[in-house]
Image (cartoon, helix red, strand yellow):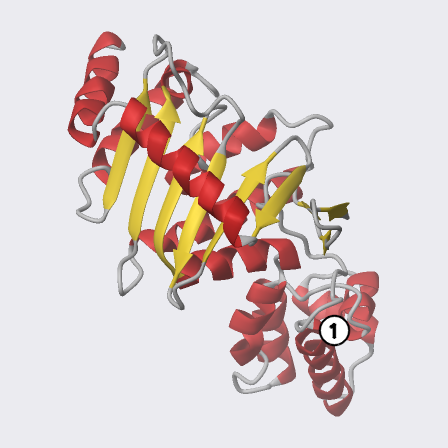
Amino acid sequence: MSVDNEGTARKDHTTDGADGASWGAEWDDEYAPVVRAAGRQIKLWREAAGLTQEELGQAIGYSLGMVSAVERARRLPHPEFLAKADEVLGAGGKLVAMKEDVAEARYPKKVRDLARLEAEATEMGSYNNHNITGLLQTEEYARALFSMRRPAHSEDDLERYVSARLARQEIFTRKPTPTLTFVQEEVTLRRPLGGRMILRRQLEHLLEIGQLRHVEIQVMPTDREDHAGMGGQLHVLKLRDGTAVGYSEAQLNTRLVSDPREVQLLELRYGIIRAQALSPRESLAFIEKLLGEMT
């Protein structure tokens, strides 16, 4: 919790990039009833079928502990768990029908909040100076990034984090389409995270996304002598109701900014960053040049 200049309390959200995903218990928000309902329905169908928790677990390939945890709302049922339980218990699709709600509850509240903001955005701008921004990452680039985290993630967590990041990229195909602008530091386009082939495919992906009519990608050259982005990466969003918000990221924290004066500052800074960067057309040509240098 931090306090602004007028003494108003403001929450700082610990996100570690706001892209995590977990099947553990984080049901302290509006999705708690969904989790409890899923567990209750599974228990009712199991008991109606005359099976013990252990017998159900053996039938669907899960442990007694997992079945127990799901029924007690201590763990979320994986979509595969729901599908197999639905078939074994003869639920006729009633358990599978909960899959979408359960899948959304899978992500921590901080991730869902960010996804909701993006879903409400009519315009979004993003400046990134460390790596390719999450919305523009290929699956293999994202996997390489998460594989580098220390302490290391488990294989299961790694896949969940990648899935959570890719799920947010639905913003590119959403209707109505928002206006999306990105400014990437030149170094992020040259750093071969995960290997040269992964970087090559990432650059090809940027060229593809950059052709979309509602997307503009710009490159900030390293040789710029004047740079408004020295305070770090930032993101600004204009929402359907006419309001605007911003957020900035650090090592372990993402700070959501809603105070109009602070948002205005971020918007001003982002506008200057865009003016100092290469134009969208120049930037795509620059990325094509980098690809040519890799052959």
Q: Residue 51 vs residue 132: left or right?
A: right
Q: Where is residue 71? Give x, y as percent.
A: 78, 74
Q: Where is residue 91? Give x, y as percent.
A: 59, 86
Vertical side of 127 occupied by 78: above or below: below
Q: Residue 258 vs residue 290: left or right?
A: right
Q: Where is residue 142? Give x, y as percent.
A: 48, 34
Q: Does dot 1 land on a helix, a strand or a loop?
A: helix
Vertical side of 169 occupied by 240: above or below: below
Q: Where is residue 220? Give x, y as percent.
A: 34, 21
Q: Which residue is mark 1?
A: 56
Task: Identify which amino acid the numbered label 1 is placed on.
Answer: Leu
x 59%, y 78%: residue: 86
Vertical side of 272 occupied by 163: above or below: below
x 36%, y 54%: residue: 171
x 20%, y 12%: residue: 292
In this orientation, does residue 137 appear?
A: no
x 70%, y 46%: residue: 4
Of 272 and 165, the residue lying toward us: 272
Quarter of the figure with residue 43: bottom right
Q: Residue 268 vs residue 258: left or right?
A: left
Query: Which of the image's four quarters has the C terminus?
Result: top left
Q: Residue furthest front?
A: 6
Few, some or many residues within 10 Å of mark 1 (<14, 14–19, 20+): many
Q: Residue 100 vs residue 30: left or right?
A: left
